[in-house]
Image (spheres, rainbow, N blue to C red):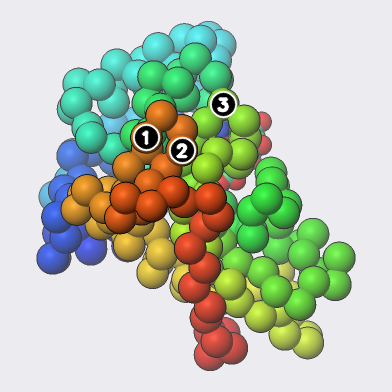
Amino acid sequence: MATIARACLQNRLAAVAVVISDRPGVAGITTAQDLGIETHVVSWKSAADRAAFELTLGQCIDAYTPDLVVLAGFMRVLSGPFVERYAGRMLNIHPSLLPKYTGLHTHRRVLEAGDTAHGATVHFVTPELDGGPLILQARVPVNAGDTEATLSARVQATEHVIYPRVIDWIAEGRLEWNGGHPLLDGKALHEPVVEYFGASYQ
Ligand code: NHR
């Protein structure tokens, strides 16, 4: 989130209208405030249930009439009806080579499986968790001796490159949702664009 916010403040076509957290007291809120960005906390814990949480969250988002909603470290599963309202206008980045390893603890699972490659994937958010159309994927090697910490640091460094890039694509009008069949530069995006990153991240 902070990387996207800083990139947008520098030289990007997009501007961050608001940063919203489902938890009070998190570093992301302080960072956004320091950058002069409006912030809100829509507390998950204080909400009566998921419907109440999503009602408040939706009102908070819609007050800014954003062109795009970007999940960055957002860890609450969102309901189908909520997600559908933002169809084609909501992105997530997930720390795996989707469709492999949806859900949680991806780095641990990659190590346990003995995979030699790992990465991160930017995708459109649909009701199916981590299941929406894939846009851009960063691939990194898994090195001998890697731990969850070294692997997640290597993946996160690539997230900071690929997530702002996809936001640029949307701001430039290069990436279109096209009713669930995304187009990049007018061509169907049947599989994600893949970018390979070397072993230099540690
Ligand atoms: N909602 C929908 N409908 N579709 C997606 O693709 C979503 C989503 C909400 C969040 C992010 C995703 C990720 O990047 C995301 C994608 C949290 C969980 C999860 O199981 C799963 C996927 C993602 C984020 N959350 C637990 C839950 O019960 C809570 C975990 C916790 O609080 O630590 O909500 O990985």
Mark 1 is surrounded, within 10 Å at the Cα level, by few (under 14), some (14 to 19) or many (20 or more) other residues, namely: few
Q: Which mark is residue 178?
A: 1
**Earlier along the polypeptide chain: callout 2 or callout 3?**
3
Q: Which amino acid lies under the numbered mark 2 shown in the image of this protein?
A: His
* SS at circle 2: loop
Q: Is residue 117 left or right of residue 128?
A: right
Name the amino acid type tagged 1.
Answer: Asn
The reply to whether the residue tagged 3 has its Cβ within 8 angstroms of ligand 1 is: yes
Give neighbour class at mark 2: few <14, some 14-19, many 20+ (Cα, 10 Å). Answer: few
Mark number for residue 127? 3
Q: Are marks 2 and 1 in contact (CB under 8 Å)?
A: yes
- Residue 178's image quarter? top left
Q: Give residue 75's mark.
A: none
Q: Residue at x 71, y 79 (%)?
A: 142
The C terminus lies in which quarter of the figure?
Answer: bottom right
Tell me residue 56's x, y (percent): 36, 15
Gap between marks 2 and 1 measured at Cα: 5 Å
Q: Residue furthest bottom?
A: 200
Indicate which quadrant contains ligand 1.
top right
Where's residue 146, x and y in %? Answer: 73, 80
Instruction: Answer with left or right where residue 19 lies relative to residue 118.
Output: left
**Mark 1 falls on what kind of element?**
helix
Q: Residues within 10 Å of mark 3 (few under 14, many from 20)?
A: some
Q: Is residue 137 above or below residue 71?
A: below
Does residue 26 appear anywhere in the picture? no
In this rendering, position of residue 23 left or right of residue 142: left
Circle 2 is placed at which residue position?
A: 181
Q: What's the amino acid at mark 3?
A: Pro
Question: Is ligand 1 within 8 Å of the beta carbon of the residue shown at mark 2?
Answer: no
Q: Which of these two is toward me, 20 or 71?
A: 71
Tell which tag, 2 or 3, sits nearer the viewer: 2
> In the displayed image of the protein, which residue is found farthest to the right?
113
